[in-house]
Image (tube, helix red, strand yellow):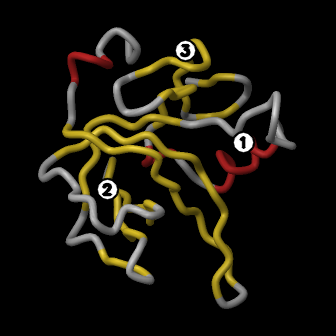
């Protein structure tokens, strides 16, 4: 599966609204790795006229309880395909995260902490999983 050379991504028209924000492609979080991040960098620089891609993942689970950072942000652990990825949802500490499986819109970032680099999903939106709204796109 690929779109524009980005491994692990099933594509559809840029700007598709899944009801969790406007997304550019479906992505399986279990396939997001260093190679995915490197391919994502090929479209940079991002900015006016070349927006950063926003991906959607369906039927993922939030592992454990979200943590509040700096009284403003939610730190999440997202599980899919037997793998967990860290995610951050900026300025949403007062928001609830749906129980059970969720659909999520996100960007992929490289985060540096104490001299080490790791992948992190930057959450744009979350909703309870809704297979009906993405079924046609995932075929």
Of marks 2 and 3, which one's residue comes earlier in the chain?
3
- Measured along the vertical axis of the image, is residue 98 above or below residue 47? below
- Measured along the vertical axis of the image, is residue 109 above or below residue 31? below
Q: Write down the residue under mark 3.
A: 12
CB atoms at circles 1 and 3 under 8 Å apart? no
Q: Write down the residue under mark 1.
A: 40
- Name the spot of residue 5 as percent of width and height, x first: 73, 28
Residue 87 seen in this snapshot: no
Of marks 1 and 3, which one's residue comes earlier in the chain?
3
- At mark 1, the secondary structure is helix
Going 59% across and 53% down the picture, which residue do you hit? 33
Q: Which label is found at residue 79?
A: 2
- Toward the bottom, the furthest residue is 114
Q: On the rendered structure, is 98 left or right of 25?
A: left
Q: CA distance from mark 1 to mark 3?
A: 16 Å
CB atoms at circles 2 and 3 under 8 Å apart? no
Going 47% across and 63% down the picture, which residue do you hit? 90
Going 37% across and 58% down the picture, which residue do you hit? 83
Question: Residue 41 sits in which quadrant?
Answer: top right
- Measured along the vertical axis of the image, is residue 67 above or below residue 84? below
At label 1, counting other C-alpha atoms closer than 10 Å, the crowd grade (few under 14, some 14-19, many 20 or more) is some
Going 84% across and 42% down the picture, which residue do you hit? 44
Of marks 2 and 1, which one's residue comes earlier in the chain?
1
Q: CA distance from mark 2 to mark 3?
A: 24 Å
């Amino acid at each position: 599966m690929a779109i524009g050379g980005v491994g692990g991504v099933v594509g559809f028209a840029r700007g598709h609204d899944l009801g969790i924000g406007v997304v550019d492609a479906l992505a399986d979080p279990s396939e997001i790795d260093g190679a995915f991040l490197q391919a994502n960098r090929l479209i940079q620089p991002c900015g006016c006229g070349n927006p950063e891609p926003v991906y959607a993942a369906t039927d993922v689970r939030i592992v454990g309880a979200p943590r509040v950072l700096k009284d403003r942000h939610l730190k999440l652990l997202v599980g899919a395909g037997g793998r967990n990825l860290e995610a951050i949802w900026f300025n949403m500490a007062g928001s609830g995260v749906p129980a059970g499986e969720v659909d999520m819109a996100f960007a992929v970032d490289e985060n540096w902490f104490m001299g080490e680099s790791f992948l992190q999903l930057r959450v744009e939106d979350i909703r309870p999983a809704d297979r009906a709204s993405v079924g046609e796109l995932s075929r």
